Amino acid sequence: MRTGPISVGRLLNLLKQSVGRAFSAVLVSGEVVDLLCSARGHLYFKLTDGEAEIRTVMWRAEAEKLRFPLRAGDQITVRGRLDVYPPRGDLQLVALALMQSGKGQKLLALEQLKARLKDEGLFDRPRRPLPRFPSSIGVVTSVASAVIHDIYQCVQKRYPACPILLSPSSVSGEFAATELVEALNRLEGLVEVVIVARGGGSFEELLPFSDEALLRSVAAFGVPVVAAVGHGSDTVLLDFVADHTAPTPTAAAVLVTPDRVELARRLTLLRERAVRGVERLLQERRVALRQLSALCQAHHPARSIIRARARHEELRQRLGRAWGRNIGSPARERLEQWKERLQTAGPGTLLSRGFSMIYTGGQLVTSIQGRTTGEELELHFADGCIVAEIKRVEPKE
């Protein structure tokens, strides 16, 4: 432990380290006074509660992220850290974020919930596709609001065949988050898609739609859920969990339903296209049928027989004329003489005189060479054939 004195700078540096560790994250509420914006964009002001004040600085990087203009007299909540500025020995609050009073704690809680659910992966889960032609639509909203009327009118105009099942719930107030979860669960297994909706509202009125229990129920629900909360500029955590989002309840009704007018137009186009296709196909078949019919007529068997008979008759007549023209009486006499000679010298004459022709295996036998005992022979006579078997073969001495 030191026994001697230390310098002022050393003391302030030790204090800076100690304060930095002990107050690295604080929330402080108060009124803005003595506001100054430097040429570099840094914000300097004091935060006071009427009894005490603390110097506060917000560097340009954080100041550029402000969603509202900071003015003297504003009641705000600062999220930041304490620091010591050694050159002057000042204790100051370094602001990392500013929130308007009344929202500070709730905004911080929402940011923390959002970061936790994002790290958990709840925001990055696969989104379920909307049914193309839903058989039923569930709506979670207040009975007293105009939301259900807007949704009903839109669905009736676009897709009137689809029924709407309302599961009523309050959409603001202390018990709204619990009622929203109960209303959503009542629709489980009864519809193909659910719209969770309400009109615009203040920050506090929209808080139930950022409730953790509701977000987890939507993520685990059995069918796609569409979030339609606020009027486009409003953002709730439900938008990060729902399968689809719409800027307004009416836009949600448009998102989940097909347009019957557009469907009718497309059906008409498809019908006309189908009719043209059928007509074109029929025309092609008619042309092919005519071609086949003409081909069949040209090759009809009756016509072929008629043409063949005519050709045969023509050739017979030509042959008769050629015979009469080229073969005279002397030629015919010589032809008859040769015919008689051929008949006399032919095998028929020899067979009729008692001779025979012997065959085996279809070949004429002219010698005993190659003949074996037991071989069958065919003996052809003028009036028929005898099948005989060789008993023995005796060559000529």
Image (spheres, rainbow, N blue to C red):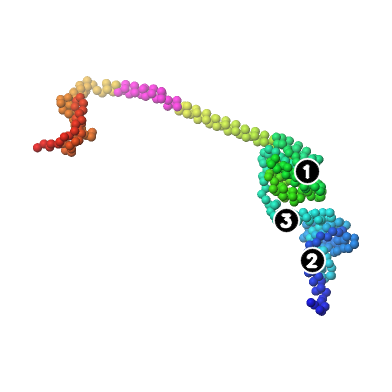
Q: Which mark is residue 169?
A: 1
Q: Nearer the viewer, residue 210 or 267?
A: 210
Q: Amino acid at mark 2?
A: Ala
Few, some or many residues within 10 Å of mark 2 (<14, 14–19, 20+): few
The residue that appears at 21% across and 28% down in the rendered structure is 385
Q: Secondary structure at mark 1?
A: loop
Q: Quadrant of residue 188?
A: top right
- The magenta stretch is 296-319
Magenta span contains residue 307? yes
Residue indicated by mark 2: 22
Q: Is residue 276 above or below residue 173?
A: above
Q: Amino acid at mark 3?
A: Arg
The percent position of residue 370, horizontal first and vertical second, equals 18, 38
Q: Quadrant of residue 161?
A: top right
Q: Nearer the viewer, residue 166 or 336?
A: 166
Residue indicated by mark 3: 116
Q: Quadrant of residue 11?
A: bottom right
Q: Is residue 27 left or right of residue 310?
A: right
The percent position of residue 8, horizontal first and vertical second, equals 83, 74
Q: Is residue 41 left or right of residue 282?
A: right
